[in-house]
Amino acid sequence: MRTGTGQPVGLRQNRNFWLQVAGAVISALGTAAAPVATAFAILYAGGSGTAIGLVSASGTLPALLFFVIGGVVADRLPRHHVIVAANLVSAVAQAVFAVVVFTHSVRLWELVLISAANGLAIAFRMPATEGLIMRSVDRAHASKAFAIFRTALNGAQVAGAALGGVVVSSFGPGWVLALDATTFVIACGLSVLMKAEGRLRRRAGMVTELKEGWGEFAGRRWLWSVVVQSAVVNAVGVGAFMVLGALAADRRLGGARDWGLILSCDAIGMIIGGLLMVRLRPRRLLVSGVCALVPLALPPAAFALGSSLVVICVASLLAGVGVEVFGVNWMTTLRQEVPHEKFSRVAAYEALGSFGLTPLGAAVAGPAADRFGLAGTLWCAAGAIVAATALVLTVPDVRKMERERG
């Protein structure tokens, strides 16, 4: 962000940035608590694990289908207005969900529709948020700003998940859902206070703008190469491991309690990684970023070896650190290399590519463990992460990408 004289604004004086951080943190508190409430609202109404999975999938599918459309819209309009609209949709959806729970009239088809509305809102909110945070900070402050933003979000998610469990057990899931709706409303108010930056660009047709975004994405070899790596890492290191890790914890450790502790260590690692990146400024952005994803192979490898809970927790913490080192370096690279008027479209294609295989990884993990054994499948997951990193490092554009001086 710059002043009217064209001079960069220091991070402390960057009003838009801090408003966005505050809004994202507040909404993340509710968003992290909501899955706990959703699951137990279904179970309290006599639903099953299958019903929980169906509701979750009904939110994922619209997000994946409409990401690229959301990117076009966010590049066309003031991005904070897009965020306001998306947050309002989520606020209404969660408020309706709360009413349904309070009136004891939970029906599966209603929850599927509510989850789909939230997924649609995510498809527009995510590209707009990433584009806005990149637009809000100058390149000189980008790395530090992204580290602060991601650390704050991770802290909110840890606190939100814990808050969700306490409130659900003490007062019931309806109150968590009402709280989530309220956080979206507050985030809307903070977004309204932001100042629009720059001018609206001339609009072309939707298809033309989709092609422009794809051209920007596909024309940068380093960009789609790292996205391919991320797709593999997310499919096996996130999607598959969430299933395989839970199975391994149930069979070999103390069940849900130990699995929760392992996931908590991962979240703590993310916070530590974000704090480290506030200070660290690696010169080779992508080399340091993609290599930081290798520790995601440690938790499945530790499980496959039959390691103790302490060892697995340490592995999970290191994986969390790696995720944030990658995330900050990746956002810094995008801010440095992608024209601001195309941020959101590129972010949409990037999100679609990076996370599109994650549901598939979760879906095939269980059958693969039944067919090849749990330990063998875990070793395959760890090997895929290492192999994807080794392959992406063979791309010259990835190795050559450096941080701009100044």
Image (cartoon, rainbow, N blue to C red):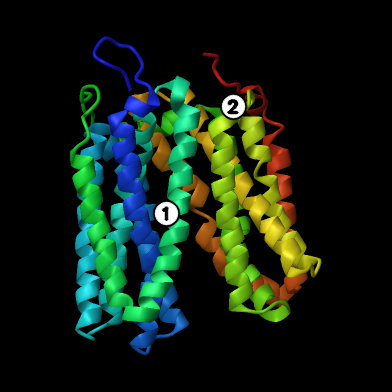
Query: Is 33 in front, or is 337?
Result: 33
Q: In this picture, is 251 found above or below 11?
A: below
Quadrant of the frame with the N terminus: top left
- State left or right for residue 86 relative to residue 140: left
Query: Is 168 located above or below residue 75 in the figure?
Result: below
Residue placed at 76% from the left, 60% from the top?
Answer: 301
Residue 225 visible in this rendered orientation of the protein: yes
Q: Which residue is mark 1?
A: 156
Percent position (x, y) of residue 131? 36, 35
Residue visible at 27% across and 73% down?
A: 175
Asked if residue 257 lies left or right of residue 218, the reply is: right
Horizontal relation, residue 172 to residue 249: left or right: left
Q: Amino acid at mark 1?
A: Ala
Query: Which amino acid type corresponds to the residue marked 2 in the rendered image?
Result: Arg
Which of 22 and 375 lies nearest the eye of the viewer? 22
Residue in view at x 41 percent, y 73 percent: 166
Q: What SS does tag 2 mark?
A: loop
Q: Residue 286: give x, y in percent of width and height.
A: 61, 31
Q: Position of residue 60 (x, y in %)?
A: 40, 61
Task: Give the residue furthest to the top.
Answer: 5
- At 55% from the left and 40% from the top, the residue drawn is 275
Residue 133 is situated, as x and y percent measured from the top left of the image, at: 37, 34
What residue does disc 2 label? 281
Q: Report helix, strand or loop for mark 1.
A: helix
